[in-house]
Amino acid sequence: DYLDKDKDYRVARLAELELLDERNIHALNHLKVYQHRISCNYNKRIIPRQFEVGDLVMKENQFNTRAEREKKGKFEPHWLGPYVIVAKYGTGAYKLAHPNGDELWEPMNAMHLK
């Protein structure tokens, strides 16, 4: 009698574990489909920006703090420039300079240029 109960328990537990594996596989497949859908929607909205040395670009007007943003107000221009690209770093960072040749001290990501 004890061996039969133990065997029944093992069979039931194995069936439960198989069902759990199926649920995990289903959840993983659902997650992959969701991630692919999110990735496709994101990629539709992204505008790839490639610039070359010598191109004229506008730089996004970035504020360091919220107080600075509120102080300058909504009438501040959103884009500053033009600037000249003097160097390209990797796949998305650019060193900028004013048209008179004065370089900005920090590189800018292409996401903040147009």
Image (cartoon, rainbow, N blue to C red):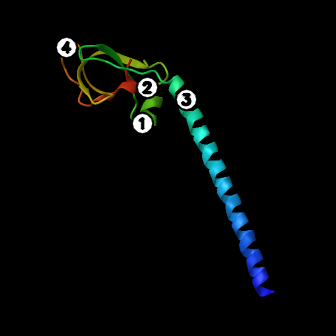
In depth, the one of 39 and 14 nearer the eye is: 14
- What is the distance, in whole Å, between disc 2 and disc 1 at their CAs? 11 Å
Mark closest to the chain's N terminus, 3 or 1 = 3
- Left/right placement of residue 53 relative to residue 35 reads left
Q: Residue at x 53, y 29 (%)?
A: 42
Q: Residue at label 3?
A: 40
Q: Residues within 10 Å of mark 4 (few under 14, many from 20)?
A: few
Question: What amino acid type should be assigned to the residue bearing mark 3?
Answer: Cys
Give x and y (percent) for residue 41.
Answer: 57, 28
Give x and y (percent) for residue 17.
Answer: 68, 64
In depth, the one of 66 and 59 nearer the eye is: 59
Question: What amino acid type should be assigned to the residue bearing mark 4?
Answer: Asn
Q: Tell me: residue 91, above or below residue 83.
A: below
Q: Nearer the viewer's eye, disc 3 or disc 2? A: 3
Mark closest to the chain's N terminus, 4 or 2 = 2
Disc 4 element: loop
- What is the distance, in whole Å, between disc 4 and disc 3 at their CAs? 42 Å
Q: Residue at label 1?
A: 65
Residue 100 marker? 4
Q: Nearer the viewer's eye, disc 4 or disc 1? A: 4
- What is the distance, in whole Å, between disc 4 and disc 2 at their CAs? 26 Å
Q: Residue at label 2?
A: 72
